[in-house]
Amino acid sequence: MKPVYRAVALILALTGFAWVCPCTAANTTTIYEFNGGDDGVWPYGSLLEYKGEFYGTTWKGGTSNLGTIFKLTPPAAGHNLWTKTVLHNFTGNINSYTDGAYPQAGLIYDANDGKFYGTTNQGGQSGYGTIFALVPPANPQGEWREATIYSFCSLPSCEDGTYPQASLVLGADGALYGTTSKGGPYYGGYGTAFRLKYGEDKLFRVIYNFCTVGYYCLDGYRPVAELIADKQGALYGTTPLGGNGSGNSGIAFKLTPPAAGTGLWTQTVLYNFCSDGDDDGCVDGASPAAALVFDTQGNLYGTTQTGKVYHAGGNRSNSCSGTVFKLTPPGNGATGWTESVIHSFASGLIGCGPVAALIVDSQNNLYGTNSYGGELDARGVGTVFKVGPPHRDGTPRTLTVLTNFLTNIDDPSANLNPVGPVTLYRGALYGTTLYGGHQGGTLECQAGGESGCGSIFQVSLGAGAPKPTGGGKSNEPHGSGDDGVPAPTTD
């Protein structure tokens, strides 16, 4: 290692930062631009790869402008264009048909019953969101079938929760688990975690109510991120609010199932963000809005929207913030989980404000997105980044910017603001941008000062790219299903 790099690495090691390589390459391709109207508007959620095709949702657009489910098929041999198919148009609660509306989350696939599952933020019987199943056709030329399998606020006072924003996850027991951002048994509703199990009973059950500990919700509240499951059946997640840190800055938590198999689960707070005080901007991160992810060693990783460590000589008035953090499980005499910041997004030049979950590959590389910032700072509208694996000599992990999304007035189809996680498939990352892409020529594709209906992009990682891992999600086949869509009950 050259002396100058060795010295910089030592400084970074002492401050806890990842070494940053501000590198970009012409490796990014826009593979689809949403056109608005029936085609869909604003893809919030992640993409799901299944058999070489990608599945996702748009928050608005479709025949009722209440969102869509779509499939993206790669080009046939000798062709360049990807083909997008709308599989379902959400219609909400109209004409006595109780459908969802405004999906914000991606889909999951249950390989055992062959169905896709997801949530909508609104719609359903009472307008507070749904869980739905998407059933593929029996033959390739047939129609896909979507059905609402649970409507939130089905219990008195909405004790089952309202307004789910996150994707579902398949637990080790084959049940579907998720969170609602509001609702529950307390005034105003602070969110719930729930379980939906198929079988003879077809039960929906609330497994945890947030804001049950302390006046200031020491157990967190308003969860917006999906849960992840371990092989023992425990669940892990984050809340952007609550906890014991300064400024009501959120927590990372674990939910453990009851020994008897029924009743509420036990929550353990793994970390309170902004525990180091907020005088210097919550140096350990604040307001996590994304799911956690396991690496192959059992460590947890995630992002926070805000919080930062100021670099020496940096501009303290810079509004850019956010972190990548690591949670190390107890060991070597420690009784609790230990949090460390891998990278602090303080400069703006490599991106700011991560709101999406990280993904991890088989070599413990991490990949993520920033919703704004980038190479041109104020004109930057997001980045895709990679955090390399731990170095054997103990020097900090390397953060590389893979792509800068730029606001370009000469390119009306520029990609703007990635808010979902990327998907790793065959040596490339695939993801969505909320804005950018085709502007559609209509007001429905303009919001927040940005324009465009959204896009889907591809970032090539080159030859020899590592394979993806499960990352702590349990999406392997579980349980048994039937040919129809079961209708759960509540208990």
Image (cartoon, rainbow, N blue to C red):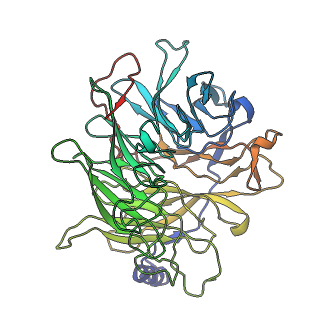
Position of residue 108 in the picture relative to residue 385 (left or right)? left
Picture coordinates of residue 191 (x, y %)? 44, 52
Residue 393 higher or lower than 133, as above or below: below
User: How many numbered callouts?
Assistant: 0
Q: Nearer the viewer, residue 133 or 319?
A: 133
Q: Is residue 73 visible?
A: no
Picture coordinates of residue 266 (x, y %)? 25, 54
Position of residue 461 in the picture relative to residue 298 (left or right)? right
Picture coordinates of residue 490 (x, y %)? 35, 33
Q: Residue at x 55, y 28 (%)?
A: 99
Q: Is residue 113 visible?
A: yes
Position of residue 126 in the picture relative to residue 160 (left or right)? right
Picture coordinates of residue 344 (x, y %)? 51, 72
Q: Nearer the viewer, residue 309 or 255?
A: 255
Work out which residue is located at the far bottom of the displayed protein and give it: 313
Residue 180 higher or lower than 403, as above or below: above
Residue 454 higher or lower than 245, as above or below: above
Q: Residue at x 52, y 43 (%)?
A: 46
Q: Residue at x 51, y 54 (%)?
A: 356
The N terminus lies in quadrant = bottom left
The C terminus lies in quadrant = top left
Q: Nearer the viewer, residue 255 or 3?
A: 255
Position of residue 39 in the picture relative to residue 268 (left or right)? right
